[in-house]
């Protein structure tokens, strides 16, 4: 019998803690597949965020740190400067990256730090129970924007790819989405290219992934996926914002 | 070959770190410690190391976290307001049991305060500062030779106990110059192996550096483990100087620059026939409580001299078991106590009786 599907080697055989329909599990899986395909498990180092995916190190089998809320790019910088031959990635939510850690991500990108960031944008704070994120959509209700986000009150959603792609130090900036199987396959290609960008020493790379938080959005998993396609992709256009020089 | 050079305090600290095998520095400018990052920015590349100016102290200390976790000897330095910003990271580094050295060249606070020297970060240095139950090993040199030697020691202790070590000096020590014997570089092959470090999981089980313990029992167990380590440090690493204490009936207690100034006062007071000495802690954590206790039945008076409004005095009083009357001579914000002032303080109390 031909084996057509199995657990990636870079993944522990462990049941995940994520809610049904959550995007983190899918992203972990494709991330582990990429690590396997590039055959870098023994050279890759992950930095976990604070957020629902803080426990990513329970699932991905490689050397890992857990950083303070938002500080993953600084921790990754410290590691990469000590071991330039390692392949270092951070995995961060929107609260982690675009709020408390905004300074760290901008400066890591601007320095052209040779790390890769997997940025999971689910437009909400998952772990702390559904508060507003910097990426929360206009009109979106959260526990701390109960009337729906209004620009004059809560400001505008932050577009991270657009922001980082203007920095000279960023090499590869791309946004994908989990709203369909085709798009998930595309995200996997983006992640692979981001790691390759790092391995070629070209600079900072970031893959933003529009993802679902059915629990805090108060939707079924199917509805949540539709909401990503209809609402989020509308505000956050998909595609490659910046390509490594020469491409 | 050790050489004797006339150097500025901040540069002494930086050179000592390099000699101790430090090859990574992450920091952010703040007066009065800027000579440290400036020195490191040219000195580290010379020895194959990396200097990186972070975007903030918050980032700097987290870069230190990353580099320490990766197994490097790593340094950061700052002063009061910057050290405050680093507290989050310091708590994480202590929790993750990573070795690093942090220099605080203290200036006067609170708030923006001023750039002039003070010792008013004592509580922050010795009692936590960040959240949770943790301790730094805190070393307080009182001259530049000691600043050099304690910096080398700091890296050793950090590795030995997998704990952050703070060198706590004030801006006077940072800015003054004196001749210092620059000792030979330490033999880097003697640095203990770090099998826990992040190096890529080649040929071994993966390493994980974390500080999250969601179950109460596990978090408590971790805290007890840390507590045990701090107790071990308290057993092994207390350092202090007793200056003319053999026959002393009264004592000055001070650390750092205040102790140095007090030494002059003690010499003058001895000439006047007063039996006085100095108890000077060199480690502020672990604090030499036992030493104070051993004097608690012998002394009739202790004058605490500190460049803060009464922080260090609590530990002195606690060590003396409240058996000895203690007075406090305070200065802060760039004003150092003068030896004349200390002398007259003691003379007023004990001068007349022909003590
Ligand atoms: C300094 C600090 N502030 C706040 C928190 C609380 N906190 C934990 S996770 C989180 C938000 C995480 O949201 P996000 O990054 O979007 O990740 P998600 O859980 O949605 O995947 C916050 C505010 C913390 N742990 N540390
Ligand atoms: S709360 Fe949201 S982000 Fe967190 S696990 Fe559940 S679905 Fe995922």
Image: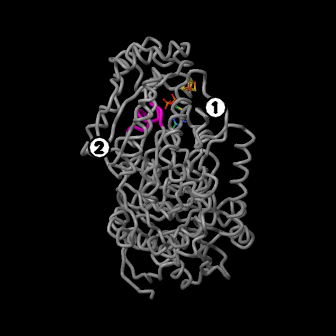
As drawn, the label of residue A154 is none
Residue at image position (51%, 46%) is: A46
The chain holding disc 1 is A
Mark nearer the N terminus (1 vs 2):
1
Point out residue B201 in the picture as x, y percentages from the top left corner. 57, 54
How far is mark 1 from mark 2, CA to CA? 34 Å
Q: Tell which of A174 and B308 is nearer to you.
A: A174
- Magenta-drawn stretch contains B184: no
Point out residue B205 in the picture as x, y percentages from the top left corner. 64, 53
Question: Which residue is under mark 1?
Answer: A16
Point out residue A138 in the picture as x, y percentages from the top left corner. 37, 16
Q: Which residues are magenta?
A: A92-102
Q: Is residue B315 left or right of residue A100?
A: right
As drawn, the label of residue A244 is 2
Secondary structure predominantly adopted by residues drawn in magenta: helix
Q: Is A169 situated above or below B153?
A: above
Where, quadrant-wise, is the N terminus of chain B in this rendering? bottom left
């Amino acid at each position: 019998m031909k084996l057509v599907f199995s657990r990636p080697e870079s993944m522990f055989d462990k049941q995940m803690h994520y809610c049904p329909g959550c995007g983190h599990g899918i992203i972990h899986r494709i991330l582990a597949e990429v690590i396997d395909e590039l055959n870098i498990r023994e050279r890759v180092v992950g930095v976990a965020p604070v957020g629902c995916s803080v426990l990513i190190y329970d699932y991905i089998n490689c050397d890992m740190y857990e950083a303070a809320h938002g500080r993953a790019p600084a921790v990754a910088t410290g590691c990469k400067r000590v071991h330039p031959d390692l392949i270092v990635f951070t995995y961060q939510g929107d609260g982690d990256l675009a709020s408390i850690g905004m300074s760290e991500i901008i400066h890591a990108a601007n320095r052209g730090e040779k790390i890769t960031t997997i940025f999971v944008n689910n437009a909400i704070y998952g772990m702390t129970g559904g508060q507003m994120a910097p990426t929360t959509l206009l009109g979106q209700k959260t526990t701390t924007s109960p009337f729906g986000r209004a620009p004059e009150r809560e400001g505008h959603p932050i577009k991270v790819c657009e922001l980082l792609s203007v920095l000279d130090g960023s090499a590869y900036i791309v946004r994908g989405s989990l709203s369909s199987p085709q798009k998930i396959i595309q995200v996997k290609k983006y992640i692979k290219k981001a790691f390759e960008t790092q391995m070629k020493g070209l600079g900072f790379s970031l893959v933003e992934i529009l993802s679902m938080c059915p629990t805090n959005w108060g939707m079924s998993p199917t509805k949540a996926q539709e909401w990503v396609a209809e609402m989020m992709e509308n505000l956050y256009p998909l595609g490659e914002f910046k390509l490594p020089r020469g491409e | 070959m050790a050489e004797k050079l006339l150097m500025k305090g901040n540069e002494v600290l930086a050179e000592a770190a390099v000699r101790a095998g430090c090859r990574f520095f992450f920091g952010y400018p703040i007066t009065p410690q800027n000579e440290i990052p400036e020195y490191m920015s040219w000195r580290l590349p010379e020895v194959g190391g990396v200097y990186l100016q972070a975007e903030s102290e918050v980032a700097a200390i987290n870069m230190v976290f990353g580099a320490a976790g990766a197994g490097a000897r790593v340094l950061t330095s700052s002063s009061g307001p910057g050290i405050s910003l680093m507290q989050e990271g310091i708590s994480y580094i202590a929790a993750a049991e990573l070795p690093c050295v942090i220099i605080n060249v203290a200036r006067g606070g609170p708030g923006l305060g001023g750039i002039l020297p003070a010792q008013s970060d004592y509580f922050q240095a010795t009692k936590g500062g960040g959240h949770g139950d943790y301790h730094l090993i805190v070393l307080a040199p009182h001259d530049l030779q000691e600043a050099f030697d304690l910096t080398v020691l700091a890296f050793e202790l950090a590795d030995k106990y997998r704990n952050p070590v703070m060198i706590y000096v004030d801006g006077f020590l940072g800015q003054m110059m004196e001749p210092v014997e620059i000792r030979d570089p330490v033999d880097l092959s003697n640095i203990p192996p770090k099998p826990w470090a992040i190096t890529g999981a080649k040929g071994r089980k993966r390493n994980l550096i974390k500080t999250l313990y969601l179950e109460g029992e596990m978090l408590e167990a971790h805290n007890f483990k840390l507590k045990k380590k701090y107790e071990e440090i308290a057993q092994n690493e207390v350092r202090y100087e007793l200056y003319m204490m053999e026959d002393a009936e009264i004592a000055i207690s001070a650390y750092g620059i205040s102790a140095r100034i007090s030494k002059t006062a003690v010499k003058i007071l001895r000439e006047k026939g007063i039996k006085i000495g100095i108890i000077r802690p060199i480690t502020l954590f672990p604090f030499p409580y036992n030493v104070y206790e051993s004097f608690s039945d012998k002394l009739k008076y202790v004058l605490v001299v500190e460049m803060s409004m009464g922080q260090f005095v609590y530990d002195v009083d606690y060590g003396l078991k409240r058996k000895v009357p203690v007075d406090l001579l305070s200065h802060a914000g760039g004003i150092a106590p003068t030896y004349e002032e200390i002398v007259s303080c003691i003379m007023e109390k004990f001068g007349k009786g022909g003590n």
